[in-house]
């Protein structure tokens, strides 16, 4: 087995709305289950840092940006459909 | 200039859009601090409308704006609008901010989301640049990503609230499948129908094709707290952007009515009209094909150029070079005026646009060259290629435009060969609007067709009630009196024959009269001679009579004297014996 790859995520949320809280919870749960000890999550609140949202072109919240490993990927929504999210993150094999 | 109240009372403040015609329809622009929904099908001009609204705000009204592009990229939008002269690249620095908010094509979606991120970004941007106007272009793109109608409604309400909170004048554009005009349509669920109830103002853009001709119309569907023109107005996207074709609103100043006369280019026609057309009048020339309508138009144009009036000649019949050649055959020389720039000719053999688009082209050209006279030959083309109603409206607008600019407008109109002669009305029904209406007609007689000209009406001028014959020759266009004899009207060679017959008759009569005079002279002379001889005779008779009287008197005296003498001689009593 090769050296585990570090997963880097940036999650844009809009304050404490229910969508945002759900997304944070879902992402944390996913990482704990599938990427233990090899993930990094940065949470950006667009109300506090709107310029970062603009810079990253994020207009829908919540938005998950996978920064690494490449290819990058964006997922919009509360991340509630686990299989879809895993598939998108290239973790489909692990989920199976 | 901010929105200006046009009537007393609580009129909502309005934000001028800078769109020609729309500001008139809405009485000053879109509701300020409120949201306007702009719906229309693909290619109906939503983006340009919205962009022009922003550009006007940024350039003229000192109201910076933000453009949220959900569909096209900002760079492409700016590039596409390059031709309109709005100087968008310069404005992008400060007064106009574009946000690319196109959802990525590979976007993956899982679970609910909202537009909170966008609003946060916008919030920051609005306060940073002090934006007053905002456009959400193609909101349907992002709404389509939302899972259900409820979510869509929630997001739109959220957005609307946000706009109101910030007092931004907003336009939201959305694609829609046209307007609800029939009962069947209203049964159909409009894609984002709920938005139309939510917003304060809704504008619908329609783009349809009628008989192969593209027609664009704009309609203000609702406008809370304001009166507006509720009708569909044709519009087009012209050189300066969006242009809505509207009639001159009531109350706008009309150019001073001129009493100046301008020549029709035909001397005798001027005489018939009592001096020519009025400047600024609308002249309609109707007739069947080949009745010399174009020739009258050409004669008018030539006379106008000769006066120094800049003239625009629009031909829907033939290329301008053909018109020039054809008119030169009847002595109307336009080439020199074309060269000097006094005359401008445009031709469109096929009508490729809607009547409204031609109207705007004509308006632009006329304004560019400062035309004082415009000839449109024939205006009826519009009616053929359009549904008559819109063409009629456009013709009215054309007349309205020329009147307000003081342009003398001459339109020719083709009568349909099949149409009833009695009707004698052009399908555009502009004859009622025209100030002067000249009817050209054929008279077929003895195997000849001849052109007749009659002035049906001419407002404000005394005009001849007579039909004249229109004669085209190398030397020009003239009118001739038609010959009426024994109740029949004669034209052409018949008139000529009749005229020459009359000339002969006159000559014969002349000779006869001269003969008679000679004879009378002779008789007179004879009588005079007789009178003189009789007078002589009379004198002779009088002399004779005098002589006779004298002789008689002498004799009587002699007799009396002789008696007395005799008595003396006889020695008789000197006095006769007195009776006892």
Image (tube, coloured by chain):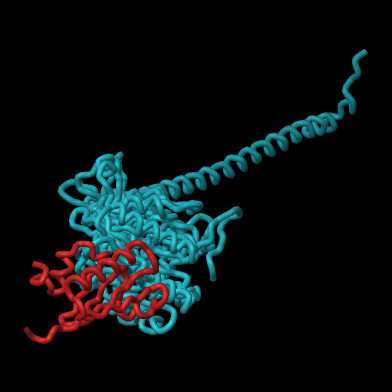
Residue B505 appears in view? no
Q: State the image quarter where residue B306 is shown.
A: bottom left
Residue B403, horizontal then vertical, whole percent: 45, 61
Tell me which chain appears red. Answer: A
Residue B127, horizontal then vertical, whole percent: 48, 75
Judge by depth and name the residue closer to the eye, B109 or B554: B109
Identify the residue at horizontal 36%, vertical 58% (top origin).
B156
Tell me which chain appears cyan. Answer: B
Residue B573 appears in view? yes
Residue B7, horizontal then vertical, whole percent: 58, 55
Q: Residue extending furthest left?
A: A1
Q: Residue extending furthest right?
A: B580
Q: State the image quarter where residue B112 is shown.
A: bottom left
Identify the residue at horizontal 89%, vertical 28% (top origin).
B574
Q: State the image quarter where residue B333 is shown.
A: bottom left
| For residue B539, side relative to residue B207 (left or right) | right
Identify the residue at horizontal 34%, vertical 54% (top origin).
B153
């Amino acid at each position: 087995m090769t050296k585990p790859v570090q997963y880097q995520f940036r999650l844009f949320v809009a304050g404490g709305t229910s969508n945002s809280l759900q997304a944070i919870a879902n992402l944390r749960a996913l990482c704990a289950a599938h990427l233990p000890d090899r993930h990094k999550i940065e949470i950006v609140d667009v109300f506090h840092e709107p310029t970062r949202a603009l810079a990253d072109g994020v207009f829908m919240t919540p938005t998950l940006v996978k920064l690494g490993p490449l290819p990058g990927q964006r997922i919009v929504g509360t991340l509630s459909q686990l299989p879809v999210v895993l598939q998108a993150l290239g973790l489909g094999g692990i989920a199976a | 200039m901010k929105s200006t109240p046009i009537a007393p009372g609580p009129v909502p403040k309005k934000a001028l859009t800078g769109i020609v015609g729309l500001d008139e329809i809405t009485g000053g622009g879109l509701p300020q601090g409120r949201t306007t929904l702009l719906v229309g099908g693909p290619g109906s001009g939503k983006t340009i409308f919205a962009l022009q609204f922003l550009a006007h705000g940024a350039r003229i009204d000192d109201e910076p704006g933000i453009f949220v592009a959900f569909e096209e990229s900002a760079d492409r939008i700016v590039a596409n609008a390059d031709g309109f002269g709005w100087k968008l690249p310069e404005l992008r620095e400060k007064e106009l901010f574009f946000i690319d908010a196109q959802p990525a094509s590979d976007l993956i979606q899982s679970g609910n989301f909202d537009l909170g991120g966008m609003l946060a970004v916008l919030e920051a941007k609005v306060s940073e640049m002090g934006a007053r106007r905002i456009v959400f272009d193609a909101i349907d793109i992002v709404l389509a990503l939302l899972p259900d109608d409820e979510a869509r409604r929630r997001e739109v309400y959220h957005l609307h609230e946000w706009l109101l909170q910030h007092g931004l004048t907003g336009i939201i554009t959305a694609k829609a499948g046209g307007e609800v005009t029939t009962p069947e349509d209203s049964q159909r669920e409009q894609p984002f129908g709920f938005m139309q109830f939510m917003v304060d103002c809704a504008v619908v853009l329609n783009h349809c094709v009628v008989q192969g001709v593209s027609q664009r119309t704009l309609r203000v569907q609702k406008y809370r707290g304001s009166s507006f023109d509720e009708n569909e107005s044709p519009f087009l996207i012209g050189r300066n952007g969006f242009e809505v074709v509207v009639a001159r609103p009531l109350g706008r100043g009309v150019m001073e009515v001129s009493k100046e006369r301008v020549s029709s280019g035909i001397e005798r026609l001027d005489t018939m009209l009592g001096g020519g057309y009025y400047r600024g009048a609308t002249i309609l020339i109707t007739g069947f094909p080949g009745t010399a309508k174009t020739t009258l138009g050409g004669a008018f144009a030539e006379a106008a150029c000769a006066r120094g009036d800049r003239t625009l000649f629009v031909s829907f019949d033939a290329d301008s070079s053909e018109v020039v050649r054809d008119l030169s055959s009847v002595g109307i020389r336009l080439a020199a005026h074309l060269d000097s720039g006094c005359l401008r000719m445009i031709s469109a053999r096929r009508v490729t646009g809607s009547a409204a688009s031609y109207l705007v082209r004509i308006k632009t050209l006329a304004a560019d060259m400062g035309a004082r006279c415009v000839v449109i030959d024939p205006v009826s083309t519009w009616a053929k290629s359009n549904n008559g109603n819109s063409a009629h409206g456009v013709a009215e607008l054309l007349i309205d435009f020329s009147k307000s600019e003081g342009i003398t407008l001459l339109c020719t109109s083709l009568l349909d060969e099949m149409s009833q002669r009695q009707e004698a009305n052009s399908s555009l029904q502009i004859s009622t609007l025209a100030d002067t209406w000249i009817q050209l007609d054929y008279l077929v007689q003895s195997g000849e067709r001849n052109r007749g000209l009659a002035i049906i009406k001419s407002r404000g001028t005394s005009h001849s009630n007579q039909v004249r014959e229109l004669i085209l020759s190398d030397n020009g266009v003239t009118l001739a009196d038609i010959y009426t004899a024994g109740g029949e009207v004669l034209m052409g060679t018949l008139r000529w024959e009749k005229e020459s017959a009359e000339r002969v008759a006159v000559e014969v009569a002349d000779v006869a009269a001269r003969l008679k005079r000679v004879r009378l002279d002779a008789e007179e002379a004879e009588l005079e001679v007789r009178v003189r001889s009789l007078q002589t005779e009379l004198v002779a008779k009088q002399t004779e009579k005098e002589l006779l009287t004298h002789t008689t008197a002498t004799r009587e005296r002699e007799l009396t004297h002789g008696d007395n003498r005799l008595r003396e001689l006889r020695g008789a009593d000197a006095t006769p014996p007195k009776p006892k």
